[in-house]
Image (cartoon, grey):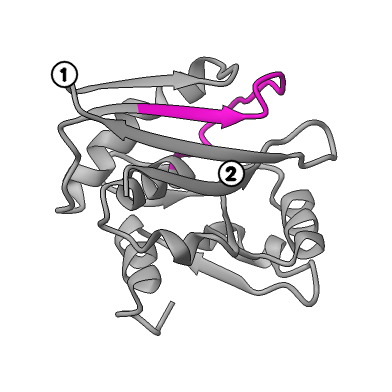
Amino acid sequence: MSLAIVHSRAQVGVEAPAVTVEVHMANGLPSLTLVGLPETAVKESKDRVRSAILNSALQYPSRRITLNLAPADLPKDGGRFDLAIALGILAASTQVPALMLDDVECLGELALSGEVRAVKGVLPAALAARKAGRTVIVPRANAEEACLASGLKVIAVDHLLQVVAHLAGTDRAV
């Protein structure tokens, strides 16, 4: 599949509007284009994501990659979309089953090593994910905050490889 969609949430005050991370891969010179009103920290995510994927012994595709953070008119800031972007790239390149991403929302900043770092504003995102009927994947450091949204399934992770293993069905300990 050359198209993948991953769900995430922005932070606007105490609101957590939905953000859809769309990843499309095409033939052509290897490049990554990020669209959808990203602020500087989000633009820098392409370097964090590439390093995290490679340092996790996964394959970073040598293709033309277009990332769209929709809706385009909603400002996006911080590293909170890193995990969703990485999973979108991995799903579009068939390293992660894309169907497993339909019912989850992802939040988390990636370190260059693939470690998943805490982000701000997880509770509003967790409440919105619960309302949408989705499971939320968050950094372990944010798990307690996410669990405050009772009735929500929370998957707490420390590393990108844990998420990949969980989505592939090879790791039940997450």
Magenta segment range? 66-82
- The amino acid type, in three-letter code, at marker 2 is Val
Q: Are marks 2 and 1 in contact (CB under 8 Å)?
A: no
Q: Indicate whether residue 79 is drawn in magenta.
A: yes
Residue 89 is left or right of residue 57, and the answer is: right
The foreground one among 36 and 171 is: 36
Percent coordinates x, y for residue 52 in the rendering: 27, 43
Q: Indicate whether residue 122 is drawn in magenta.
A: no
Q: Name the residue carrying label 1.
A: 29
Percent coordinates x, y for residue 156 in the rendering: 52, 67
Cα distance in 3D space between marks 2 and 1: 33 Å
Q: Name the residue carrying label 2.
A: 119
Q: Residue furthest right?
A: 14
Is 159 above or below relative to 35?
below
Q: Residues within 10 Å of mark 2 (few under 14, many from 20)?
A: some
The answer, for residue 100, to whether it is visible in the render is yes
Q: Residues within 10 Å of mark 1 (few under 14, many from 20)?
A: few
Image quadrant in which you'd find residue 151: bottom right
The answer, for residue 109, to whether it is visible in the render is no
Taking the spot 83% from the left edge, 40% from the top edge, the residue there is 15
Q: Residue furthest bottom?
A: 172
Taking the spot 59% from the left edge, 65% from the top edge, the residue there is 103
